[in-house]
Image: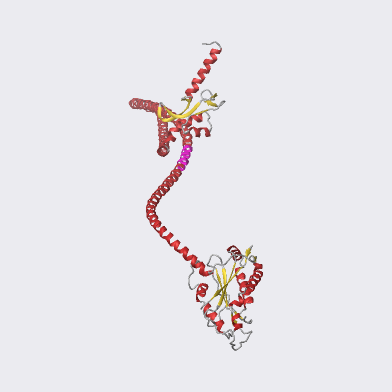
Amino acid sequence: MSYAVLHIMKASGSCNAIARHIERSTQPDNAHPELRHLNREDFIRYPEGVGGLGEAIRYRLDHAGLTRKIGKNQVLALNVLLTSDGEALRRLADEGRLDEWAETSIRWAKQTFGEDNVVGAHLHMDEQTPHLHVTVVPIVTTERKRKASEARATKRYRTKPKNGPRLSADDIMTRENLTRFQDTYAEAMARFGLERGIRGSEARHVDQHEYYRQCQIKKKGLEQDVAILSSEKRQLDTETQSLEKRKKELERGNRWMDKTFAETKAANAEMTRQNDELEKRKSELVKSNSSLTATNMSLTTEKEALEADKKKMANEIAEIEADKSRLIDERTTCAKEAETARKEKETALQEAAEAKSQRDANRKDAFSNLANRFTGSKTKRLESELAKSQEEVKALKERAEQTSKTHNNEMWNLRQQLDRQKEQHDSIVRGHKETENLIQRFFPGVIAALPAIRDCIQVKMSDPLITALLDGKPRSFKTGSTLYDPNEEKDVDVGNVEVQIKRDPTDGNNCRLHLGGKRVFQWFKEKWQSLKQTVKRGFGIR
């Protein structure tokens, strides 16, 4: 439970010192300037023409109707300090009730000391514990108590009004009143969770002057500490400069490392991208190679068929040439027969002319008609056969020329097709070779490991095991493990046998799969030979 704190201090003289502190016209050592904007002084408005707390006190004294002269050492105002512990006030601030607490405290002060006597109220939030300064002018209307010396005096003065207003801090700050103030203020603060302080407590409030005196003592000690710390600071500044220089060097090194790391990361990303592209290109090339293999096989088949057609056409051309030679021979024979028939005709005509003059006209005509009939029929027959042979020779020649032309066109088309396929194949081979060179350049171990990977695939090894073996470290198979021997087409027990992918002694550029320190297929061969020898010895065979 937190306490409601009430403390009343007398302000003598012109009250300027307490006014400067309350109105913050001077900066106290224990106040934080950056929090000054949180202070409030608008709870009570000054009368028109009054510009500060000191003038407000003077204004109240001038307008209170005092009949007595104010003494030089008389108390002009009371500084009523209202507060609690910091935790309680921060709780009220968090709940948004701090202004309500301040207004309730001011209302209690007005009810206790008189509304006209409360001339100022200032809430200070810039110190460690928030608190409220209420300035009260101690004007009372009760009858003044006479001192004992006055009672014994023989000289009498003019009697002044007994219940008139007068300035008296002592009448307000009696023991009974101070106790009552504590009780009534605690009752007003109960709604905020604050209770009255312990009755009869020996705790005493440290006044402002004592507090500042203690602060001055602490200040001197702190100044000495500051001098020592300044010396240490200068030393630390020197070390800091050295560290700053070292820091700049390290930052420069870090920037270079960051730049190098970024460049390396970018290069790795680029290499990864290129590797992905190469893998993609490799897959495409494998597909292209598969397609080209099928195409080559198809072209080989077509080439063989074309070669067969070519041989067939050559045979046909040979037959045509033979027919042509035969026809030429027949034509020559026909020409000879026609020449013989012509000569025979001429001889017959000559004989017929000679006989014509010696025989009788009728007989000569008869013989002439007979000769004409005989020679004309044979000549026509020979000429007809010769013309027919020439037509056949011409048809055969045209057929041979057409066949030769068709054959030449087909050969040219085949040659063009083969050239295109060869050019395409060479382009694919060049691309494949370029891809292989890139892989060899950036991943030199991949090309060398391909023969070993093919060995692993041939023996039907799992992909995870192949990937694990690519690090080149030796491993041993578990008991009961088997591998496939493609030569024997059987599974072979390889339990507890050492397996490793390493360089081939006979070809240092390639890696091979090794079992028991030997090439896998050599190990299979020796394994089967050993097994056969064991079986033979079991049957007594040598």
Query: How has the structure been colored for display?
Result: secondary structure
Residue 163 occupies quadrant: bottom right
- The residue closer to the viewer here, 53 or 183, is 183
Q: Position of residue 281 (x, y in %)?
A: 46, 41
Identity of the residue drawn at 51% across and 18% down:
530
Residue 147 can be seen, yes or no: no
- The residue closer to the viewer here, 302 or 352, is 302
Identity of the residue drawn at 62% across and 70% down:
100
Q: Is residue 62 left or right of residue 234?
A: right
Q: Please identify the quadrant where the N terminus is shown.
A: bottom right
The mark tally for this picture is: 0
Q: Is residue 230 above or below residue 429?
A: below
| Residue sitting at the far bottom | 158
Read off the magenta span.
276-288
Q: Is residue 230 above or below residue 390?
A: below
Q: Is residue 364 left or right of residue 487?
A: left
204 inside magenta stretch: no
Q: Position of residue 279 (x, y in %)?
A: 47, 40
Q: Position of residue 210 (x, y in %)?
A: 51, 68
280 inside magenta stretch: yes
Q: Main secondary structure of the magenta part?
A: helix
- The residue closer to the viewer here, 132 or 72, is 72
Residue 260 can be seen, yes or no: yes
Residue 372 occupies quadrant: top left
Q: Position of residue 119 (x, y in %)?
A: 57, 78
